[in-house]
Image (cartoon, helix red, strand yellow):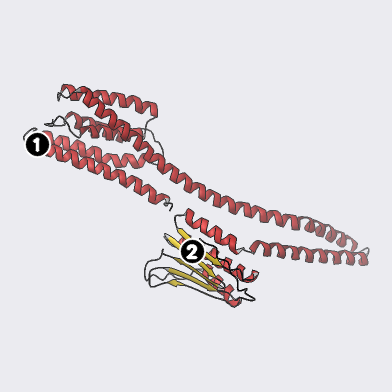
Amino acid sequence: MAARPETARKILIYWMDGVVALIAVITVAFTVGRSMAGAISPLHAAVAVTCQLGLCALFPVLLREAFDHRPRPTWKLALAGAFALTATLLRPTALDNTSPWIEVGTLWLAAAALYLSPRAIACLSVAVAGLLTVHGTLVHGQSWPGVLISLVINFAFMVPAMLLWRWLWWIIRDASNAREARARLAVAEERLRFARDLHDLLGHSLAVITLKSELAAKLATKDAGRALTEMAQVRALAGDSLAEVQQAVHGYQHLDLDQEVAGVRAALEASGTRCDVHVQADGLGPAARALLAWVVREGGTNVLKHSRATHCAITIDGGLLEMRNDGVARGAAPPPGSGLRGLAERLVAAGGTLSAAPTATGEFLLRATVPVVGERPAREAVPA
C-alpha cells in the first residue's frame, strides 16, 4: 500500500531522530561513566556533554532544513561542526581503546552531506578521517590502521545512507506530485475536449444565424416575405443547435459503470487505500448502470476528501451497491454534503434509495439501490 507523502516524510525524519537520540544517550552515558570512574574531571565531562548534546540538538534542525532540497551551508552547520570537533577533542579515553566518538564525527559529516556537493563531501571526509586518525593515534595511543578502518566503514555507511534517505523522500514526493499533475491534466484535457465539441457544434451555426439575422433585418423594410423566410430559417437553425448542445451535454454527463469503478479503484489505491471490488451487474439496463456509476464516483470522492481510510470495499450485486471504508471513527456521524444530497434526490426520482452512515464496527457504509428492469439470471463476477 502506497504511503501518503507527508506520512512517509515523518517516518523518515523521525527514524533519523531516533538514531540521533540513541547516539546522544550512548555518548553522554560513556562520558558520565568515565567521569564517575575518575578518568576525567567533572568540568571536562560537563563541557564534553554540552557539546555532544548541542550537536545532537542541531542535527534534527539541519535535517529538516535540507530534507526537501539542498540549501547552502548555514551557520547552524558550522556550529554543529564546532560542537562535533570539541566533543571529539575532549572525549575521554576508553580502557579498551574503543569509544563511540567515531559516531560523533560521522553524524556531523552525514549532516554536511545534505548541504554540500559530492566532491566537497568527499574532500571533507578525507580531512575529517585524517584529523580523527591523527588525534586517536597521538593523544589516545590507538593503532592508526584500526582507527582509519573504523572511520572509513562508518563514513562509507552513514553518509550514503543519509543521502539515500533524502533521495527516497524525493522519489515519494515527486511520485505524489506526478499523480496530482496527471489528475489536473486529465481534467484540463476533458475541459478542452468539451470546449472543442461545443465550438464545433455552435461555431458554424451561430455564424450562419448571425448572417441570416442581419440579412432579415435589412430585408424587413424591402421584402417582408423574404425576411420572414430568413427568420424562419434562423429559428430552425437555433432549434437544431439547441438539440445538438443538449445531446453533447447528455453524452458528457453519461457515466460508464465499469470505467467509474476502475477509475475510483485506481485513485484510491494511488492515495494509499487498498480497494476490493466485486461487481455483478450484467442484468442492469443503461439507466440503472449510469445511476450506480454516479454513486461510485461520489462515494470515491468522499473517501478521498473526507476520510483517512486504509481499506475500501465496493460491492455491486444487481441493483444493490455498497461502499465500505474504515476511515471514519467509531460513532462519528458527519453531516451529508451537497454531493450526497443531490445524489439521493437523483436516485429517489428514479425510484431508488441512498443511505450513508457509520456502522457499529467503525466503518462508513454508503448503500444505494436502483430499480432493476428485465434482469437476466446469469451474472458474471468480476474479481478484485
Left or right position of 250 against 119: right
Sort mark 1 into few (<14), some (14-19) or many (20+) by Cα contacts within 10 Å: some
* Residue 173 screen position, x and y as percent: 44, 46
The mark tally for this picture is 2
Q: Give the amino acid type for the residue marked by disc 1 in the picture.
A: Ser
Disc marking residue 35:
1
Q: Position of residue 260 (x, y in %)?
A: 57, 61
Q: Is residue 78 visible?
A: no
Residue toward you, 35 or 46: 35
Relative to 344, is 111 on the left or the right? Answer: left
State the residue at coordinates (93%, 67%): 225
Q: Quadrant of residue 105?
A: top left
Q: Residue at x 27, y 32 (%)?
A: 81
Q: Which residue is mark 2?
A: 302
Mark 2 crowdedness (10 Å alpha carbons): few <14, some 14-19, many ≥20: some
Q: Element type at marker 2?
A: helix
Q: Quadrant of residue 207?
A: bottom right
Q: Residue at x 28, y 30 (%)?
A: 153
Q: Which mark is residue 68?
A: none
Residue type at the position of mark 2? Asn
